Image (cartoon, grey):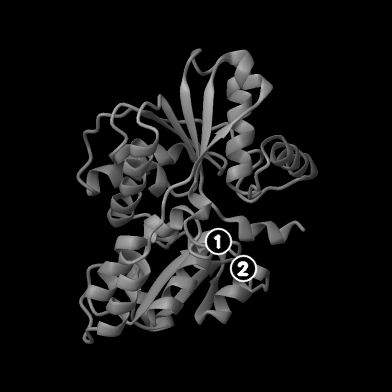
Amino acid sequence: MTNSTFNVLPSEPLDAYRRLYEETDLPLNVEGLEHALFLKKRLSVCVVRVDQVHPQISGNKWFKLKYNLKAAIEQGASCIISFGGAYSNHLHALAYACHCLGLHSVGVVRGEPVDNPMLIDAKAWGMRLHFVNRETYRLRAEPAWLNALPSLVGDGFILPEGGSSALAVKGVGELMQQINTVEPALDYVVCACGTGGTLAGLVSTAAKTVVQGIPVLKGAGFLHDDVSALLLASGHERTASKWELDLFGHYGGYGKMNAEHIAVMKQLEDDFSLSLDPVYTAKLFRRFMEKVENDDYPEGSRIALVHTGGLQGRRSIT
């Protein structure tokens, strides 16, 4: 479905796309992080502030959506359909992007119908929500179910969950190129993972830097295959960089935010004078500090953590 051609060429959305992406200057901000543990372990650590690239198309979503949106417009799509949970950063960013581009959007949402700040925003930006039970949601990548989906929600350009596609890899690859320019001698780049698109994109252009992904889902070993498939689909089956997954940073599973995790997040925010989101970046920082304590990084290593945004999700805990 993502390669379908639609009947109307939307010249106005294309003009809007150019204004949004091609005429926007987004310098990448990289900030050094100081901590007694880093001094003790003799590490140089920084954070890549991808959360600052756009106020609504948050963090890595800016890069993951970039070429997916362009492909949809060039194929004449007037609507984009995608998938996510009730607190999906991807659906939130997609709803705003489509609003800016004059496109319709449909979010296929996992679970019973609910209202929360994220979905209220999405609806205000024009996204139509279609809730499905968890069993049905598991079919989101099945060709037969996708072929039947337009009969339920209408025609549209179907974008995978999280926006993770070969085109997302291309967009995030540009982010990694920017990181290489600002910090050319990194030994490690570390990011949180959901669907694996951001990790694959970073790996695609990371040169000799080791890219570590910290999945926020429990039992996320399947991401080895998913990331490999994304690299293959985007023409990066063979890369100069090494990549790996650390499967111990989920802290109970996706979206799990018990009192201990929130307390750790707030302490990390105090330590680094930095706002984090509880689902992704708080788990990234928490697991990274554990890895540093465990001597997982050789002395003298230069390490960048990727802040992938999603700060609007903090409204679920405040």
Q: Which residue does the image show at 35% across and 44% down from the upper left?
A: 178
Quadrant occupied by the C terminus: bottom right
Percent coordinates x, y for residue 292 in the rendering: 59, 21
Percent coordinates x, y for residue 230 in the rendering: 30, 47
Residue toward you, 162 or 266? 266
Q: Residues within 10 Å of mark 2 (few under 14, many from 20)?
A: some
Q: Earlier in the sequence, mark 2 or mark 1?
A: 1
Q: Whole-Å distance between the Cαs marked 2 and 1?
A: 8 Å
- SS for dot 2: helix
Q: Confirm or deny contact between disc 2 and disc 1 (CB under 8 A).
A: yes
Looking at the image, residue 313 lies above or below residue 50:
below
Looking at the image, residue 57 lies above or below residue 213:
below
Q: Which residue does the image show at 49% across and 48% down from the upper left?
A: 194
On the question of residue 279 being in view, the answer is yes
Residue toward you, 146 or 181? 181
Q: Which residue is mark 1?
A: 88
Q: Name which residue type carries label 2.
A: Met
On the question of residue 143 being in view, the answer is no
Q: Name which residue type carries label 1.
A: Ser
Percent coordinates x, y for residue 19 in the rendering: 34, 72
The numbered mark at residue 175 is none
Q: Which residue does the image show at 30% across and 71% down from the upper left?
A: 18
Q: Residues within 10 Å of mark 1 (few under 14, many from 20)?
A: many
| Image-based side of 156 in relation to 269, left or right | left
- SS for dot 1: loop
Q: Which residue is mark 2?
A: 118
Looking at the image, residue 158 lies above or below residue 76:
above
Percent coordinates x, y for residue 207 in the rendering: 28, 31
Picture quadrant of residue 69: bottom left
Residue toward you, 294 or 276? 276
Q: Which residue does the image show at 22% across and 75% down from the upper left?
A: 75
| Image-based side of 136 in relation to 7, left or right | right
